[in-house]
Image (cartoon, coloured by chain):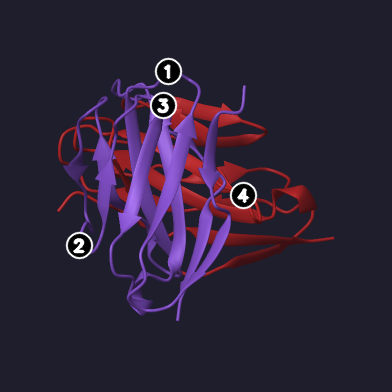
Amino acid sequence: NAGVTQTPKFRVLKTGQSMTLLCAQDMNHEYMYWYRQDPGMGLRLIHYSVGEGTTAKGEVPDGYNVSRLKKQNFLLGLESAAPSQTSVYFCASSSGLAGETQYFGPGTRLLVL
Amino acid sequence: GDSVTQMEGPVTLSEEAFLTINCTYTATGYPSLFWYVQYPGEGLQLLLKATKADDKGSNKGFEATYRKETTSFHLEKGSVQVSDSAVYFCAGEYYGNNRLAFGKGNQVVVIP
């Protein structure tokens, strides 16, 4: 039981390049989330999904797109990376029930030059 | 808007000292409240939670009580160890769909 996994662990991009971050969970959770973590800012929600085929915007969605084609996977895309997107990205999943725990992946560290 | 606020700045203390990290929340409804911990190089993991007023969450020697009268959920541990060195985040569930509002986190460093 791997829980929540993220690929890749670390990536360096040049400004304007694109990439996709992959999140996978094996807990049969309906809900999945993408956050970014920046120094002094805590975690901010980028996008989330309440089930296969659904996506919704979070607090800081600009510059990102997401897809949830399969229940166990949640992809985060950067179409044209900018230095302001340098961050650590975390994926999480949960059952979606009120008061339930979110389970986090180990993170992807992204550097945009 | 709905938010949780943590005390500013890192916390450095000696082994076996008493730890308190303050967290207050905005009182829109009655959010479930959580403390998550992030060890170096890892993702966040749940430390404890409370879903209604007067509930006390506890785990690994840490405790926090949901206090409606002071809109607080302060984290405490009576005797910290070096292994407790981590970043601690307070979070509140305000928006439905299990979405969380996180505080900015506190770096805790425990010195032997």
**On the image, numbered disc 2 is attached to which residue?**
A62
Q: Outermost residue toward the bottom?
A: A113
Q: SS class of the residue under badge 4?
A: loop
Judged left or right of residue A104, residue B60 is: right
**On the image, numbered disc 4 is attached to which residue?**
B42
- Hey, what amino acid is under mark 3? Gln
Instruction: Decide if residue A48 is in sight here.
Output: yes
**On the image, numbered disc 1 is attached to which residue?**
A28
Does mark 4 fall on the same chain as mark 1? no
Does mark 2 fall on the same chain as mark 4? no
**On the image, numbered disc 3 is attached to which residue?**
A72
Instruction: Decide if residue B7 is in sight here.
Output: no
Distance Cα–Cα, label 1 vs label 3: 7 Å
Does mark 3 fall on the same chain as mark 1? yes
> Quarter of the image holding residue B10?
bottom right
Distance Cα–Cα, label 2 vs label 1: 28 Å
User: Would you say the residues marked 2 and 1 are in contact, meaning their CB atoms lie under 8 Å apart?
Assistant: no
Does mark 1 fall on the same chain as mark 2? yes
The numbered mark, 2 or 1, whose residue comes first in the sequence reads 1
Q: SS class of the residue under badge 1?
A: loop
Residue B84: x %, y % from top left: 70, 49
- Hey, what amino acid is under mark 2? Asp
User: Would you say the residues marked 3 and 4 are in contact, meaning their CB atoms lie under 8 Å apart?
Assistant: no
Q: Categorize mark 4 by other alpha carbons within 10 Å: few (<14), some (14-19), many (20+).
A: some
Pick the front one: A14 or B96? A14
